[in-house]
């Protein structure tokens, strides 16, 4: 339930739907301020505005984030203030960061998606459905092993872990069916496995990339659960799990309609992390946005080397959705961090991200997200650097001023799109490139590496996927968000370094191969003083501290 303050200021979900000219058949209300959007909106014969997608990315962030969600929401509100029909499409927050390092992920101040506390927590149950579907498959695999293993699965080569939407490092490595050997003698006894955070589940990526119920079923059936003793992939379809997983995900497939602090429509759906997955809201959400609005402000996770790269090289190819422009969020604090305390030294990082986006063919505008401690001299210096790079920039004060603090940015983004209405957007590699070459092209052209080294394990897995006929898939590189390199402590825009690929995982249902760089973990841990310590409920039932 929304807090009293929210309830006083928010529009009803019916009012938001009316803004978008939706009929009552197009949505199912969930409480007073949310709804599930029906897939019939994308049906044949529906009128479409053919809106433009604005990709919002950033320079390399600090551990506390640079306000990319705040800027995205503020830009949507700013577009409405200049008379443009806009929709914000964003990801659903994961409970891991909410209770961990960053806190909530629904924006902040006068630039939030609302009702923010509910969106940050259970929302409409999508994350729970994804977690349940993931763990159903895991349970069915172990049950299959217990009852004789007719598919001849190799217990040592089962690829499917468990999932939970919480940062819990103690679950990275676990043993299942402990002590069952003596009781039943089944093959899965004392099998080593682990947990991933729900945002890293392949089910999350599948739901985010699915184009329809039929496509969702196809992708679920294609999940490779493990490998048989004779070396063939064993899928979720083979295990017989796809139908039940479809049932669990039936409502979660539908995008969620909510609103921003100023009543701008927002579609919040799916939540893959950009450091370990593809890092953007669902294809269905974006397609609905394009149909219903003139401009769709779509946030991609972390910086241009992660969320934006994966959008151009994975999402764009899977969906056909092409951005019309890219906004790079930069802050004084992030650039100083990349310059190890020196703002001027941090400009190399800004320049790198701008050049990466320009290489993809996207018109670029830099949003300078102003924080209270920033000086006029520092902000002016970033403006000067952007001019030197040949890109427009605008100070945004979305947190404190909402849409009014984002009008300049909105006008410059619209101008960039109108000046180049048909940009030639292109991925960094071709579908026919071998998997190793795809990884190499991302490393050298996007990260700035000199080359790539592969562990024997990674090479063997990539060769196996190619032998299975999956070498045409795009690659999703799991890499630290805190550096362009695979070393989170290496700042700026380093040259002369080598990307280390230590492992590879197949996400056949999602439609990509995950290459694990450096020491990336798919299950984060809580910090020494997690955000959970500050979260509570007051005597009136209002959630505080998120």
Image (tube, rainbow, N blue to C red):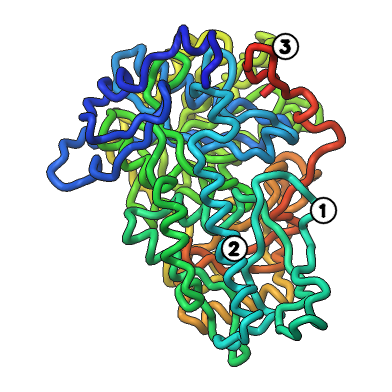
Q: CA distance from mark 1 to mark 3?
A: 38 Å
Location of the C terminus (image quadrant): top right
Residue at left 42%, top 59%?
A: 246
Q: Nearer the viewer, mark 1 or mark 3?
A: 1
Residue at the bottom extreme of this rendering: 230
Q: Which circle marks residue 214 in the picture?
A: none
Mark 1 or mark 3, which has the lower sequence index?
A: 1
Circles 3, 2 touching at the beta carbon (< 8 Å): no
Q: Is 3 in front, or is 491?
A: 3
Mark 2 or mark 1, which has the lower sequence index?
A: 1
> What percent of the width, then of the height, locates residue 234?
53, 79
Crowding near pointer 2: few (<14 within 10 Å), some, many (20+)? Answer: many
Task: Classify 401 as above or below 506.
Answer: above
Q: Which residue is mark 3?
A: 373
Q: Which circle marks residue 170 in the picture?
A: 1
The kind of secondary structure element at disc 1 is helix
Q: Is 313 in front, or is 504?
A: 504
């Amino acid at each position: 339930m929304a807090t009293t303050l929210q309830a006083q200021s928010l529009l009803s979900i019916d009012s938001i739907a009316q803004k978008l000219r939706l009929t009552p058949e197009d949505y199912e209300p969930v409480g007073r301020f949310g709804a599930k959007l029906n897939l019939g909106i994308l049906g044949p014969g529906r009128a479409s505005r053919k809106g433009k997608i604005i990709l919002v990315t950033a320079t390399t962030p600090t551990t506390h984030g640079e306000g990319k969600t705040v800027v995205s929401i503020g830009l949507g509100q700013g577009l409405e203030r200049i008379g443009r029909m806009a929709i914000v499409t964003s990801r659903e927050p994961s409970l891991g960061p909410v209770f961990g390092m960053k806190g909530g992920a629904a924006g902040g101040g006068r630039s939030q998606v609302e009702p923010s506390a509910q969106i940050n927590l259970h929302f409409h149950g999508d994350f729970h459905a994804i977690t349940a579907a993931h763990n159903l498959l895991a349970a069915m695999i172990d049950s299959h092993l217990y009852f004789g293993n007719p598919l001849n699965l190799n217990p040592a080569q089962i690829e499917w872990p468990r999932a939970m939407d919480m940062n819990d490092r103690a679950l990275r490595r676990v043993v299942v069916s402990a002590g069952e050997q003596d009781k039943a003698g089944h093959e899965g006894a004392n099998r080593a496995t682990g947990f991933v955070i729900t945002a890293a589940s392949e089910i999350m990526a599948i739901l985010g990339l699915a184009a329809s119920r039929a496509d969702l079923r196809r992708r679920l059936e294609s999940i490779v659960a493990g490998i048989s003793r004779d070396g063939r992939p064993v899928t979720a379809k083979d295990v017989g799990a796809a139908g039940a997983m479809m049932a669990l995900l039936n409502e979660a497939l539908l995008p969620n309609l909510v609103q921003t602090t100023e009543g701008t429509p927002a579609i919040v759906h799916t939540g893959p992390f950009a450091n370990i997955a593809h890092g953007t809201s669902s294809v269905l959400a974006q397609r609905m946005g394009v149909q219903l609005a003139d401009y769709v402000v779509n946030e991609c996770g972390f910086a241009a080397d992660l969320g934006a790269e994966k959008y151009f090289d994975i999402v764009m190819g899977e969906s056909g959705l092409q951005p019309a422009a890219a906004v790079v969020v930069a802050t004084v604090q992030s650039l100083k961090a990349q310059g190890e305390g020196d703002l001027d030294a941090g400009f190399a990082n800004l320049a790198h991200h701008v050049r990466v986006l320009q290489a993809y063919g996207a018109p670029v505008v830099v949003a300078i997200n102003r924080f209270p401690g920033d000086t006029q001299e520092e902000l002016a210096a970033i403006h000067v650097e952007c001019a030197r790079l040949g890109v427009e920039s605008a100070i945004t004060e979305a947190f404190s001023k909402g849409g009014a603090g984002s009008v300049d940015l909105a006008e410059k983004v619209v101008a960039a799109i109108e000046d180049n209405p048909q940009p030639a957007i292109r991925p960094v590699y071709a579908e026919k490139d071998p998997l190793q070459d795809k990884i190499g092209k991302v490393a050298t052209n996007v990260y700035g590496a000199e080359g790539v080294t592969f562990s024997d394990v990674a090479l063997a897995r990539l060769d196996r996927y190619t032998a299975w006929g999956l070498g045409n898939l795009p690659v999703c590189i799991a890499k630290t968000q805190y550096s362009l390199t695979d070393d989170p402590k290496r700042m700026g825009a380093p040259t002369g370094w080598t990307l280390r690929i230590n492992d590879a995982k197949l996400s056949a249902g999602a439609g990509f191969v995950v290459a694990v760089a450096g020491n990336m973990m798919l299950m984060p841990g809580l910090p020494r003083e997690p955000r959970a310590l500050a979260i509570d409920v007051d005597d009136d039932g209002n959630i505080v501290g998120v």
